[in-house]
Structure formats: structure tokens, C-alpha cells
Image (cartoon, rainbow, N blue to C red):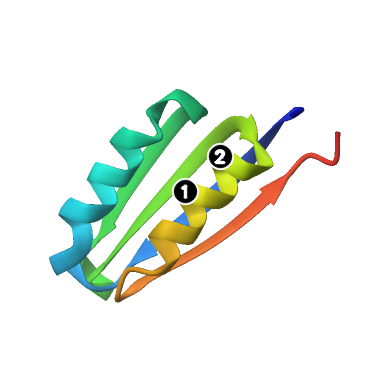
Amino acid sequence: MEKRIGVVAVIVEDRTNIEEVNKLLTLYGDSIVGRMGVPYKEKQVNIISLIVDGTTDEIGSLTGKLGKLEGVTVKSALTKK
């Protein structure tokens, strides 16, 4: 399957799940090219941006598992080719 490059935005509003988020990011580390995390304390939210390079199945699996966590919102954009 062809690989795609993209970005994934992760917003964590429930800090009780941050450990699970980090476990998933470690598990899918081979597909993650770069990561930037910003704790926005004034709004009590954590924002993580990811640069990814993987198949649509790999990226979809990561975003799907993240999105199932309580208090976690995920959006992604991938190249078409």
C-alpha cells in the first residue's frame, strides 16, 4: 500500500487520558516524523500536532484509537498521492 504524508491534530481536554495518548503515539512511532505538544494552561487543554508518513491504514488506525479516548478530539489531513 502506498504511503502518504500528512498532519494530525490532537486536542486533549481530559488529562486523565494523556498517558494513554502517549502510549499510542509511542506504539505508532514508526509513522510519526515529528511531534509538537503545547500545554495551553489558560484553557486547560493540551494540543499535539503530528507530522505523519504512513499508509492510510496505519494513520487511520492511530487516529481511530486516539479518537475513541474520552476527552480527545482528532483531525487529520493527508496528501492525495
Residue 35 percent coordinates (x, y): 41, 35
Relative to 11, say whether 43 is above or below. Answer: below
Q: In this view, does 69 lie to the left or right of 64?
A: left
Residue 45 percent coordinates (x, y): 28, 68
Residue shown at 20% from the left, 57% from the top: 18
Residue shown at 57% from the left, 43% from the top: 59
SS type, badge 1: helix
Q: Which mark is residue 50?
A: none
Q: Which amino acid does label 1 sit on?
A: Leu
Tell me the quarter of the picture where residue 53 sits. Answer: top right
Q: Name the residue under label 1.
A: 62
Q: Is residue 32 left or right of residue 70?
A: right
The quarter of the picture where the C terminus appears is: top right
Q: Is residue 80 left or right of residue 60?
A: right
Residue shown at 85% from the left, 41% from the top: 80
Q: How many marks?
A: 2
Residue 8 percent coordinates (x, y): 54, 49
Closest to the observer, 69 or 37: 69
Closest to the observer, 19 or 10: 19
Relative to 27, say whether 66 is above or below. Answer: below
Q: Residues within 10 Å of mark 2 (few under 14, many from 20)?
A: some
The quarter of the picture where the N terminus appears is: top right
